[in-house]
Amino acid sequence: MNRRNFLYGSMGATALGLFGLPKMALATLPTVSLQTPEHLSGNPLLDFSGLPKYSKIKPEHIMPAMQFLIDESKKVIEQVANQPNLTWDNFYFPLADIDEKFDRAWTSVSNLNSVANTPELREAYNSTRSVVSEFYTWRGMHKPLFDAMMTLKNSPEFAQYNAAQQKSIDDALLSFRLSGIDLPKNQQEQLADINKRLSELSTQFGNNVLDATNGWHKTFDTAEPLKGLNEAALQSAKKAAEDKGQTGYRIGLDTPSYTAVMNYADDAALRAEVYEAFFTRASELGPNAGKWDNGPVIAEILSLRLKKSKLLGFKNYAEYSLATKMADSPAEVMAFLTGLVNKSRSKAKTQVEELAKFAKTNYGVDKLNAWDMAYYTEKHKNALYSFDKEMLREYFPEDKVLSGLFEISKRLFGISIRPAKADVWDESVKFYEVYDALGQHKASFYLDMYARSNKRGGAWQSVAIDRIRRADGSLQLPVTVMAMNFRKPADGQPSLLLHDEVNTLFHEFGHGLQSMLTQMEILGVTGFNGIPWDAVEFNSQLMEGFTLDRKSLPLISAHYKTGEPLPSELLDKLLEAKHYQGAYRLIRQLEFGIFDMRANTEYTADKPSNYAQNLFLQVVDEVGVAHTPRYVRRPNFFTHLFSGGYAAGYYSYLWAELLASDGFAKFEEEGVLNPVTGKRLEDTILSQGGSRSPMELYINYRGRKPDPKALLATYGIE
């Protein structure tokens, strides 16, 4: 998930944050006339009419466009911050106009860097990102701009502003302070250097992971070594070889290929080889040892984060990170996480012991290795519930899942989703428009579902265009991007999704709904903007509940050949299995959350360069219940923490899941497809963006604070 922040955000974000447009007569208010120089007249990044022109954006367009927008932004900032007789109107509207343009251009570049990465684009993005980072730092330390905002804050008119306006100003002032506005000049310069270097390191980390993921493959002349994989997985491996001009079958470390091997390949030696290649990515070990090693990158990131935090008056980076989150302190987060460990670890240990006993009894396996866990989990699950993941694929063809997702959204929120045409970065990308119950265009979104070699791994949602009201009174509609890494259709067969992938699709669409259903018109609080990081996963995780419900499942499932619904006995088994290994799955998330919080709390300048790796192994030994090989280098490709904005924030998934579990329980109580409940969710939370505190909005929705028992129940823990 990608969102805006006043100064930095995700580096694919706006430098705006404070400014958005309240509902008022706007036609006579001041705007910025952006005069594009003749030599930039054909630059697609400076064409702000309609949707982004993705296919026309070339690497050589990036630096000139962003440098021009930076120069224009600086001119406007100097003008509005130093003008006499300051008012909301003469301060806000010129900034909003230029900031909206800056935001759209840089977001387009950032999106392309994630979904259509090439060496040339990467080079242009990396060099420009440093310039953009310097601009954000310059702006965050611009004293006249800060003073102007303080003038608005302290003015008699402030009391007359609506809640969204007040919240956006308060958020912006906090962002200024977290950007070093109160520091002396020499320390501001030091902080600027740190921010620039952290930006470079974050990009380098992500690039190393992408290169390491693409840098390993294995090709077989026949399918015999891949025995156990189903026909669809074999066809994908065959197509992967063909795409590289090879014959036979090619496997790699992309998610569809990796999971197919780990879950189903009968050859334990092959599973071990693939496991080691995957878990030593971007490290000093493994088949590409040292080639894209993120170990030194991690060490420098941790060091610079600590220096930055101390400059700003915090003891550690975790304290700095939590300054803008719901959780008050690292101690509160650790109490939350360790409390969950205490409630789940015993049951998780029992679940692993049951799996080991099953593997020994039925397959003669004396020891469950790390590369055996997924394989025998599928065998065990099949024995208990008479189905496996791959068999379920046949009942989740992409088109049926999407039509069902859209139908559920229509019933809950009264929206209709229609395919439309747009300029896209890959021919497989789909584009849709969203309409309300009255037929009014409400939002749009891109859906990029398939894995590609030039696309980063995982799944995410990012914003292309935010919902705001412009200075001329017109309303800019939101546009969002949702990306996954599912298996491509092959040999005339549609893309068939694992149920886990269905869950992923609903998760990212839940993020998208928060962008698309917002009614806020102030950029600092529209969509995700202004929402604390530990609350942004609320709706994404709430939407996952619809993938495991008896009333909604028939809407998203049908056999891809016959159209027959998911058989009732299979539906029963799927629902029965939803708590399978629930405690073990929770423990794995707790390992990551505790490692993250401890790394960003306990790190000190005298720690060794391999501190993160040592801490990770310590945490999995203390918290985990399954053996982790000593060569596992999980921190080296943990993009959430070192490249994705979740540093000292990975706990947010579980923090928000507590809200989501209790929030979905309201649907279960009132009817899972109840439009009244859906409307209440939209009106009280989704439409409100970051205009109020998440707990206030949640209480408005639920009528009370969340019940912690709901989270444990999600994992089958009493």
Image (cartoon, rainbow, N blue to C red):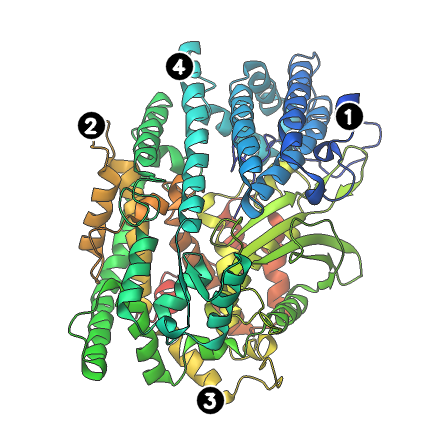
Residue type highlighted by circle 2: Asp
Q: Position of residue 162 (x, y in %)?
A: 65, 37
Task: Look at label 1 and name its amino acid.
Answer: Thr
If you read the primary sequence from the N terminus, does the residue marked by circle 3 or circle 4 appear first? 4
SS of the residue at dot 2? loop
Label 4 sits on a secondary structure element that is helix
Residue 259 located left or right of residue 173? left
Q: Which residue is mark 2?
A: 606
Identity of the amino acid at label 3? Glu
Of labels 2 and 4, the one closer to you = 2
Looking at marks 2 and 3 on the same chain, the residue that comes earlier in the sequence is marked by 3
Write the residue at 18% across / 80% down.
364
Residue 185 in percent (x, y) is at 44, 10
Q: Considering the numbered disc 3 on the image, is that residue within a helix, a strand or a loop?
A: helix
Give the crowd class for mark 1: few <14, some 14-19, many >=20 residues within 10 Å: some
| Residue 589, horizontal then vertical, whole percent | 33, 56
Q: Which residue is mark 3?
A: 569
Residue 456: mark: none
Residue type, label 4: Gln
- Residue carrying label 4: 187
**Percent position of residue 342, x then y:** 22, 59
Q: How many numbered marks, from 0 up?
A: 4
Q: Nearer the viewer, residue 590 or 67?
A: 67
- Quadrant position of residue 57: top right
Which residue position holds label 1? 31
Disc 1 from disc 4: Cα separation: 35 Å
For discs 1 and 3, the disc positioned in front in the rendered view: 3
Q: Marks 1 and 2: CB-CB under 8 Å?
A: no
Query: Among all residues in the image, which is located at the extreme right?
Result: 28
Label 1 SS: loop
